[in-house]
Image: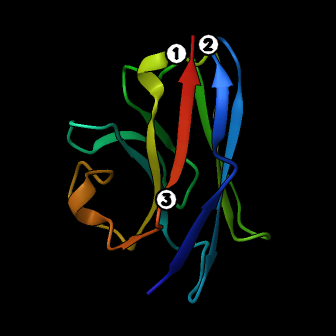
Amino acid sequence: QVQLVESGGGLVQTGGSLRLSCAASGRSFSDYNMGWFRQAPGKEREFVAAIGWRGSTVYADSVKGRFTISRDNAKRTVYLELNSLKPEDTAVYYCAASGGGPEPWYRAASFGSWGPGAQVTVSS
């Protein structure tokens, strides 16, 4: 199993930017697919972005062009850059790790390790 801890959340204004970090420990980081999910109050958890162990990336339509996921295997860390933030981006953001699974490989059910979450609040 992989232990994950998110950091970098906070309060920003509409149009602002933020970078979330997720530090991993426990097992080999480079072999895992990594993802970001979010959950807003009263809504279901939704997929945001994912990056595979080979570096391929996938984004939800709602964030494509605004968010960027990346990873630094040497630092055992995955990042999510949130740009051009909107109030609807307000949510708890969760980092997750997957050892692999059926296509689509970035589905939530394939991620067995989850961080405790980081709050991102976007004000107008």
Q: Quadrant of residue 9?
A: top right
Tag 3 residue: 34
Q: Does residue 36 lie above or below 98 as drawn?
A: above
Choose the circle earlier in sequence order: 1 or 3.
Answer: 3
Q: Residue at x 53, y 46 (%)?
A: 119
Q: Residue at x 57, y 89 (%)?
A: 26
Choose the circle earlier in sequence order: 2 or 1.
Answer: 2
Using residue 111 as the reference point, say whether residue 109 is left or right of it. left
Q: Residue at x 48, y 21 (%)?
A: 64
SS at mark 1 in the image? loop
SS at mark 2 in the image? loop
Callout 3, which amino acid?
Met
Q: Does residue 53 lie above or below 87 as drawn?
A: below
- Given this view, does label 2 or label 3 mark the residue nearer the observer? 2
Contact between marks 1 and 3 (CB within 8 A): the answer is no
Q: Residue at x 70, y 33 (%)?
A: 18
SS at mark 3 in the image? strand
Q: CA gap, disc 2 to disc 1? A: 5 Å
Tag 2 residue: 14
Tag 1 residue: 86
Using residue 54 as the reference point, say whether residue 100 is left or right of it. left
Q: CA gap, disc 2 to disc 3? A: 27 Å
Badge 1 density bin: few <14, some 14–19, many ≥20, Cα 10 Å: some
Image x and y of residue 40, in percent: 33, 37
Image x and y of residue 20, in percent: 65, 47
Residue 42 vs residue 25, the one in the foreground: 42
Q: Quadrant of residue 83?
A: top right
